[in-house]
Amino acid sequence: MFANFPFLSILTLLPLVGALVVALIPKSKGQLAKVVALAWSLVVLVFSVLMWIAFEAKGERFQFRESYPWIPNWGVRFTFEVDGIALVLLMLIAVLVPLVILASWHDAEQTKRSVPTYFALLLALECTMIGVFAASDIFLFYVFFEVMLVPMYFIIGSYGGQRRQYAAVKFFLYSLVGGLFMLAAVIGVWIVAGKNSFDWQTLVNADIGTEAGRWLFLGFFIAFAIKAPFFPFHTWLPDAGGAAPAGAAALLVGVLDKVGTFGILRYCLPMFPEASRWFAPVAIALAVIGIIYAALLAVGQNDLKRLVSYTSIAHFGFIGIGIFAFTTQGGTGSVLYMVNHGLATGLLFLVVGMFVSRRGSALVSDFGGAGKLVPVLAGVLFFAGLASLALPGTAPFVSEFLVLIGTFTVHKAWAVVATAGIILAAAYVLWMVQRTTQGTLNPALTAVPAMHSDITLREKVVVAPLVALLIIFGFYPKPITDVINPAVQATMQDVGAQDPGPTAVANGRTAP
């Protein structure tokens, strides 16, 4: 019924139109701008749900394909299509954006800047995020990849906290440099493939030599590693995540960074299978180093938002080892990790933002015993922290387990070292919760009127869906894995990877 419905072009254009409408609302009517932005994002959510229902998990790999002429002389087209990997990330965007808008209800007013502009930027950001996951023309993908920087740059630079301008410029420059590497690689692929098309399916089947493929792979990988971010390209994230408003930080870490890992799965592996296998040992080593390094830095952070940013760097290390293990378990776990990390870290950032808005500070040392004043909010922070460290019964546990199992079958030593990151995660999460909400009440908190207000109805509406999804998918991830598995299996076939067979022990020796 909906097979030929133009879901992807509508979903891409809807937030852009909404952004223009909200931007035209007078500055004096901030409340109207909020309501319109929220309503518009809910319409996007409805269309996304309809697309999810219409998607056939056992059907063709790519569905809802649309292709319109753009620059005929270069073979550039507006081509959109999604597989299961892109679909679950589009749903993540559709779920998070309305919650972020609701959570950011008073953020712009606190900065004394234009309220309509802030919410227009959030909708513009949603447009670019949808476009980058839906694009199937690599030139179109590159355009969305770069344009996506603009709304986030202005959100951080105009509506962020301390050092917001420094953080915004650093975020923009790092991403721009990565984009230049990608641009060079995009042009290189187009030339090597015969200057006919930028279409993904055409380029995957192109004959790209070994040496050229390795150089082009590195161009894409560097851009995606910066965006993800993987160690050692990660240094922009703590600054950007620490300075951005909490809602924007939830989108930055929960969605924007997934463009990097999505890009590796969608472009690096299928287009350059030999180069992917060649570079895999280095990629896994960097991912494992990132897990341990970021976790150690997180333990020593006194700023709540920077702490959450460092935890995300560690989580992206798990995603990285799952991707480059080249097993279906590892690949499925990585994609599932992207979704679950978006839910868990999005919740953690939003709840941290609620604490920061009450206290007027993000420093752990400025809290202490806050749970005595806001017990329900403290409980939600505790749950978000446990989900972030992948407690069994929460959704991230399933994805982390799949990643480690899928990696252990082919790289036992790396999987064992990565497991140490789980222990460190417990340390930094429990330390944060204990220092912030438990123990003796900090006398300074009693003098802050906002700290005597526990979670509000609006905040309950924000956190309840995320809590529910984290629990539901913790016990029943099948609706997501059924959609992800066919796309992951197809990607592994593109790389030429096969899962290792079972082993049996005979006469003291291990044999296949």
Image (cartoon, rainbow, N blue to C red):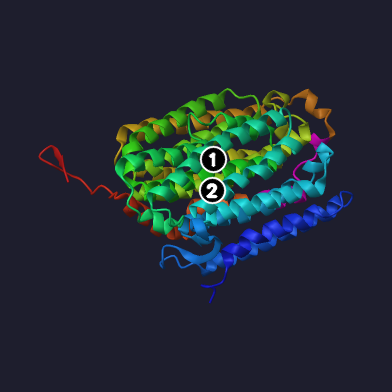
Relative side of 108 to 351, left or right: right
Q: Secondary structure at mark 1?
A: helix
Neighbor class of circle 1 (other Cα within 10 Å; few <14, some 14-19, many 20+) is: many
Q: Position of residue 387 (x, y in %)?
A: 55, 42
Q: Residue furthest left?
A: 507
Q: Position of residue 181 (x, y in %)?
A: 49, 38
- Name the kind of residue labelled 1 in the image: Gly
Front residue of this view, candidates 5 and 319: 5
Q: Which residue is mark 1?
A: 179
Residue lying at 52% horizontally and 69% vertically, measured from the top left? 54
Residue lying at 58% horizontally and 66% vertically, measured from the top left? 7
Q: Position of residue 440 (x, y in %)?
A: 70, 24
Neighbor class of circle 2 (other Cα within 10 Å; few <14, some 14-19, many 20+) is: some
Q: Main secondary structure of the magenta part?
A: helix
Q: Kindly tell me whether residue 333 is visible in this rendering.
A: no
Q: Secondary structure at mark 2?
A: helix
Q: Is residue 477 magenta?
A: no
Q: Which labelled disc corresponds to residue 200?
A: none
Q: Residue furthest right?
A: 28
Task: From this view, report whether residue 313 is shown above or below residue 21.
Answer: above
Front residue of this view, candidates 503 and 209: 209
Q: Kindly tell me whether residue 149 is visible in this rendering.
A: yes
The magenta stretch is: 450-465
Residue lying at 51% horizontally and 58% vertically, measured from the top left? 73
Distance CA(mark 1)–CA(mark 2): 8 Å
- Name the kind of residue labelled 2 in the image: Tyr
Front residue of this view, candidates 286 and 510: 286
Q: Which residue is mark 2?
A: 142
Residue lying at 35% horizontally and 56% vertically, measured from the top left? 205
Task: From this view, report whether residue 294 is shown above or below residue 350.
Answer: above
Asked if marks 1 and 2 touch (Cβ < 8 Å), the reply is yes
Relative side of 99 to 483, left or right: right
